[in-house]
Amino acid sequence: MRRILRSLLIALPLAGAACGQSDTPQPLAAVEPAAAHPAAEAAATAARPRIVFLGDSLTAGLGLPREQSVPSLIQARLDGEGYAYEVVNAGVSGDTSAGGVRRLDWALDGDVKILVVELGANDGLRGLPVAQMKKNLSEIITRAKERGITVVLTGMEAPPNYGPLYTSEFRRAFRDLSDENDVVFVPFFLEGVAGVPALNNSDGIHPNTEGAKIIEAAMWRALEPLLREGAETR
C-alpha cells in the first residue's frame, strides 16, 4: 500500500495537468461491438440494454487507443461471451464526484441495466472534503437504484500528502457507501496496477494497455455474476 500511495503522490502534478477539469459533458461514447459494421447489426446494437461506466480519465482511457480502454475491453469480452449488452464509456478526464452528479441523467439515457461508478480519484488529488465526495457518490447510487439500475462501485486511494487521517477517511468512505447502499463493490479500481511502472503510462498514474487488461479482468469478475443473473431472469 505504501508503494501505491507513493506512486500517487509522485504522479499528483502530472495527473493534475493531464486530467484538467471538464465540467462540460462530452458526447456519450458507446463502445463499438467487435465486427459491428453491417447496418442491420448496428441497429440491433442500438437496441441492446446498456452497461454505463461513469468515471474520470481512468475510465475514459487517457493515453490509450479508444479500443484499449477498460469499457472497450469489457465490450469485447461481452461480445465474445455472447452477452447482448452495449457498453457506454461515460468517462470524462478531470471529473470529480460532483461532476458525476451533474451529468448523471445524461449518462443514464437509454435502457441502462448496470452502472459502474468510478469516481473520486480527482477529489482525492485535490484534497476535496471526503464528506462531500461521499454525499455525491451516495446521490449517484441512490438515483440509479431508483431507476432499477444495478450499481457497481469501485474504490480509490487518496495520495498521502493530505495526511494519514484524510487517506484513511477517503478509503473508508467507499467501504461505507457499499455497506450502506448494498451495492457490488470493487475495493480499488487500480488494484495490481497502481505503483507498477510497467503497467502505467509515463505519468505514473494512468494504466497502459497491459494495466487496462488487469483492470478489465477484475471488473469482469464483478460484472459476470450480474450478467448471469440477468440472463436467468429474462
Image (spheres, helix red, strand yellow):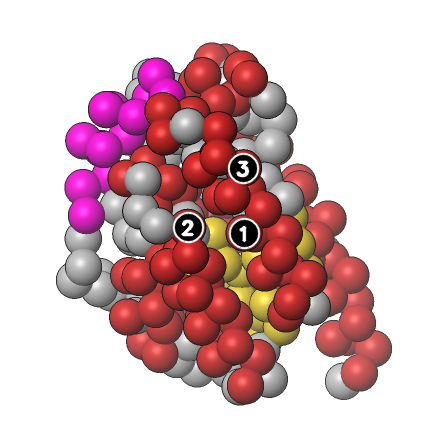
Q: Mark 3 — residue?
A: 168
Dividing the picture into quarters, in which one does residue 171 lie? top right
What residue is drawn where x is 37% and y is 59%? 132
Q: From the viewer's perspective, is 230 left or right of 39?
A: right
> Is residue 77 located in the magenta-colored stretch of the structure?
no
Q: Amino acid at mark 3?
A: Ser
Look at the image and give the residue range highlighted in magenta.
9-21
The residue under label 1 is 173
Q: CA distance from mark 1 to mark 2?
A: 7 Å
Mark 2 or mark 3: name the one nearer the start of the chain: 2
Q: What's the residue at 44%, 37% (across, down)?
A: 166
Quote the CA–CA distance across marks 2 and 3. Answer: 10 Å
Q: Nearer the viewer, residue 222 or 172?
A: 172
Query: Residue at (30%, 70%) from the top-left corner?
Result: 103
Q: Name the one closer to the observer, 147 or 172.
A: 172
Task: Kindly identify the residue that appears in the image at 53 percent across and 15 percent down.
Answer: 3
| 1 and 2 marks in contact (CB < 8 Å) | yes
Residue denoted by label 2? 130
Local crowd at mark 2 within 10 Å, few (<14), some, or many (≥20)? some
